Image: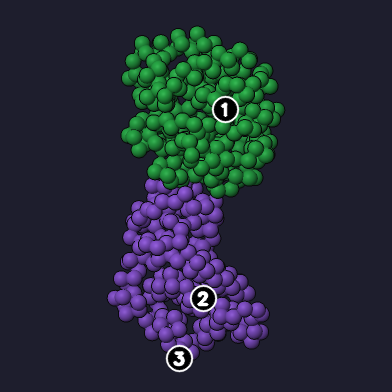
Chain colours: A purple, B green
């Protein structure tokens, strides 16, 4: 059975999966709904509340604040999303990247609209982006040189966290792309105002 | 003792596991929670799965099984399933009792003396008032079936669903009690509860609004997943309500049972008693 419901500020035309609105939020999903609007990852996962219950804390742990700087994490998330061509994640994390002290030129480079080799000068960030391209931009083994250059700049715990971050972003990229999740109107307006849409 | 068994023992979660055997029905009641009617999709629970769930329920600490629908006795295998379930846990099955004639009545004979009760809906002592809610000739069929079940030795309960029990005409309710006594059903086996404003009742503007806080937490398994109350898997305008959905996973039963304890286990026993919806 299906029913089309309109949710918050998100555009919901032609969705693959009908978002679960707040009034229909299952018991386990309710804590993840926000009065000011709930994103489509939550409103889609709410169809399977036991999956939502573990996925959202996982996402928050891996993508949220941690021992690694937010700017560094956004390099991984946005570059990975660009390589996977996830429209939702690229749009959403372009805005997050701006809030994490990345410049518009850097965001454009991460999105593949300019050369990141020219936009980023710091050795650790260049090593990280080369590694992300190797991990998210191809299949099979990651070239040893990419991993070695990453290790020159990051500790073992950091490498593990960055690897998990990249892998989780790939998962989210495919989830959001397959379900054609829409970015919020607010995000699209923000990007338009920054000339990034 | 497991967290589930502890919650049941302390009354924070109901001890009865409810199974929605099916959604189709030979009636189309005005207040039906599930918009059940002839021709709606069956969405039946496989009997083998029902037995497996009952066994898991017993292991987890549940104390009984309830079967509801739809009309469970539209399923030919229901009497046999009930007998097998009763070997695992005591059973109550909700029915409109309009099918208990001929071969269907005879099929119930093996259930006599088993820990099984059939709970039958009867809303008024007046045929016209009852049938306005439940359909033509419902009253006559029910009052004919109940003595037959009693004669077979099958436990019978009567459930009366009213728009507002508190303001209902007491003399009318008295007449109904006289009627069920005359049919062989004691006062202890008669329950009166309000219409819950969900499903078709919500569409019709009937009954009392009831959310999770007003309902006893009772794990309820359907073909669509596990819910926190038998009043949960309601259907409105053809769409399943998910506001009382617990998990899509129904087996192993420990998954939804554990989730229900997490969302309801912190409430005091009797938290839901305000509206008396049981």
**Which residue has dot 3 on it?**
A118
SS at badge 1: strand
Residue B183 lies, in percent from the top left, at: 52, 11
Evaluate whether label 2 is on the same chain as label 1. Answer: no
Name the side, left or right, on which B176 lies relative to B4: left
Q: Residue at x 29, y 76 (%)?
A: A193
The quadrant in which residue B212 appears is top left
SS at badge 2: loop
* B183 to A115, vertically: above or below: above
Chain ID, mark 1: B
**Which residue has dot 1 on it?**
B93
Give the Cα distance between marks 3 and 1: 72 Å
Instruction: Judge by depth and name the residue closer to the eye, B62 or B151.
Output: B151
Residue A100 lies, in percent from the top left, at: 41, 74
**Which residue has dot 2 on it?**
A84
Q: Comparing marks 2 and 1, which lies closer to the viewer?
A: 1
């Amino acid at each position: 059975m299906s029913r089309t419901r309109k949710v918050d500020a998100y555009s919901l035309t032609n969705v693959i999966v009908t978002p679960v609105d707040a009034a229909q939020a299952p018991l386990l999903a309710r804590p993840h709904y926000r009065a000011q609007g709930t994103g489509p990852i939550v409103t889609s996962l709410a169809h399977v509340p036991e999956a939502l219950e573990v996925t959202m804390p996982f996402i928050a742990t891996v993508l949220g604040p941690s021992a690694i700087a937010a700017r560094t994490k956004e390099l991984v998330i946005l570059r990975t999303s660009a390589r996977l061509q996830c429209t939702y994640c690229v749009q959403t994390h372009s805005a997050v990247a701006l809030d994490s002290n990345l410049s518009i030129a850097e965001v454009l480079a991460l999105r593949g609209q300019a050369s990141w080799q020219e936009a980023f000068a710091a050795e650790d960030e260049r090593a990280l982006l080369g590694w992300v391209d190797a991990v998210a931009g191809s299949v099979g083994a990651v070239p040893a040189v990419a991993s070695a250059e990453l290790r020159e700049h990051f500790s073992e715990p950091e490498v593990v966290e960055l690897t998990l971050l990249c892998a989780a972003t790939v998962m989210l990229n495919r989830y959001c792309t397959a379900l054609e999740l829409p970015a919020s109107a607010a995000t699209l307006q923000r990007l338009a105002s920054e000339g990034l849409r | 003792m497991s967290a589930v068994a502890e919650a049941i023992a302390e009354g924070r979660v109901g001890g009865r596991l409810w199974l929605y055997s099916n959604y189709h029905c030979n009636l189309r009641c005005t207040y039906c929670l599930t918009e059940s009617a002839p021709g709606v999709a069956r969405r039946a629970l496989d009997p083998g799965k029902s037995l497996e769930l009952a066994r898991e329920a017993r292991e987890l600490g549940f104390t009984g099984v309830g079967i509801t629908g739809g009309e469970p006795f539209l399923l030919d295998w229901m009497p046999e399933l009930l007998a097998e379930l009763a070997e695992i846990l005591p059973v109550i099955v909700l029915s409109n009792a309009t099918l208990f004639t001929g071969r269907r009545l005879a099929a119930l004979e093996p259930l006599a003396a088993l820990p099984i009760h059939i709970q039958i809906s009867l809303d008024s002592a007046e045929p016209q008032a009852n049938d306005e809610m439940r359909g033509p000739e419902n009253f006559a069929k029910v009052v004919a079936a109940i003595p037959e079940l009693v004669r077979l030795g099958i436990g019978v309960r009567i459930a009366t669903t009213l728009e507002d029990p508190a303001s209902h005409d007491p003399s009318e309710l008295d007449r109904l009690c006289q009627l069920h006594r005359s049919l062989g059903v004691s006062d202890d086996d008669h329950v009166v509860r309000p219409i819950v404003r969900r499903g078709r009742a919500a569409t019709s503007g009937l009954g009392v609004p009831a959310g999770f806080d007003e309902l006893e937490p009772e794990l309820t398994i359907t073909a669509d997943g596990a819910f926190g109350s038998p009043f949960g898997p309601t259907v409105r305008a053809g769409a399943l309500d998910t506001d009382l959905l617990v998990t899509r996973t129904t087996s192993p039963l420990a998954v939804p049972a554990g989730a229900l304890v997490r969302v309801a286990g912190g409430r005091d026993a009797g938290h839901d008693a305000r509206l008396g919806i049981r």
